[in-house]
Image: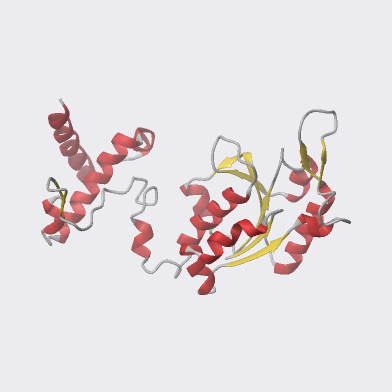
Amino acid sequence: MWFGIISLFPEMFKSIIDYGITSKGIKKKLLTLNFWNPRDYTKNKYHNVDCNIYGGGSGVILKAEPLIKAIHAATQKVKKSVKTIYLSPQGKQINKLYVNNLLTYKNIILICGRYKGIDERIIHSYIDEEVSIGDYILSGGELPAMILIDILSRLIPGVLNKKSSNDTDSFFNNGLLDCPNYTRPRILKNKEKVPEILLSGHHKKIKKWRLQQSLGYTWLKRPDLFKKKKLTKEEKILFNEFKNDFFKKNL
């Protein structure tokens, strides 16, 4: 997957280029990141990239012309069909369905806004979609862009060492949260023990326990997700067992 990133601060992306899963994807040549800075398309590299808002009011927005030139440069680089996304608090929020749909695109341009945003005419003429990571305001679109790249990179075949690592993650685990996980030591501070089932070596029972815990944890932590889940006959039995045990321990 190829990403063309338009940002006033491309240096911020060094963290995902040098570290973590995204870095592995880049080294394996499964992921490519190219950058365009709107400042490079102004008469003065350190000025003329933003301006006051027509009609008055506080704050500034990014000017249209430098952004248009940067978008054109990015589009010319890939020379193939490309999806252009503007990271914006006014956009649709990222979720599992959106991410899966986005995987059908091999070339994506990400536009990182700054200040109070960008000229509305850019959105009308050059943007395919506005995308948000939540109902709050950040200083710019760089962090949301990095989050989106990280999410997508995990789903590109070959980036993760094992596909099952992603299949069992929260939200990608059949719409459920992940089950609780444990590692060494078996007993923590002389009292907290790893559940015996995980030490049994009985893989079928472990798989069933993990499903039951995922159902229960989703019910407890994200009831909104649980309401959307259509349970199979087996899942209903496992969930009812979890719920009964939960109430026994907490009443």
Question: Which of the pair 238/42 is nearer the observer?
Answer: 42
Residue occupying image coordinates x 66% and y 58%: 10
Residue 79 in sight: no
Q: How many marks?
A: 0
Left or right: residue 5 versus residue 166 is right
Quadrant in which the N terminus is drawn: bottom right
Report whether 190 appears left or right of 102: left
What colour scheme was applied to this rendering of the protein? secondary structure
Residue 22's spot in the image, x, y percent? 50, 63
Could you say which quadrant of the image residue 35 lies in?
bottom right
Give the quarter of the image for residue 223: top left
Q: Is residue 235 above or below residue 105?
A: above
Extreme residue toward the top, this view: 251
246 left or right of 58 in image: left
- Residue at the spot 57% in from the left edge and 35% down from the top edge: 136
Q: Quadrant of the C terminus?
A: top left
Residue 130, image x, y percentages: 64, 44
Indicate the position of residue 20 as horizontal and vertical percent values: 46, 63
- Seen as rendered, the residue at the extreme bottom is 28
Q: Is residue 182 shown to the viewer in this render?
A: yes
Q: Residue at x 12, y 60 (%)?
A: 202
Q: Among all residues in the image, which is located at the extreme front?
A: 189
Percent position of residue 3, x then y: 62, 62
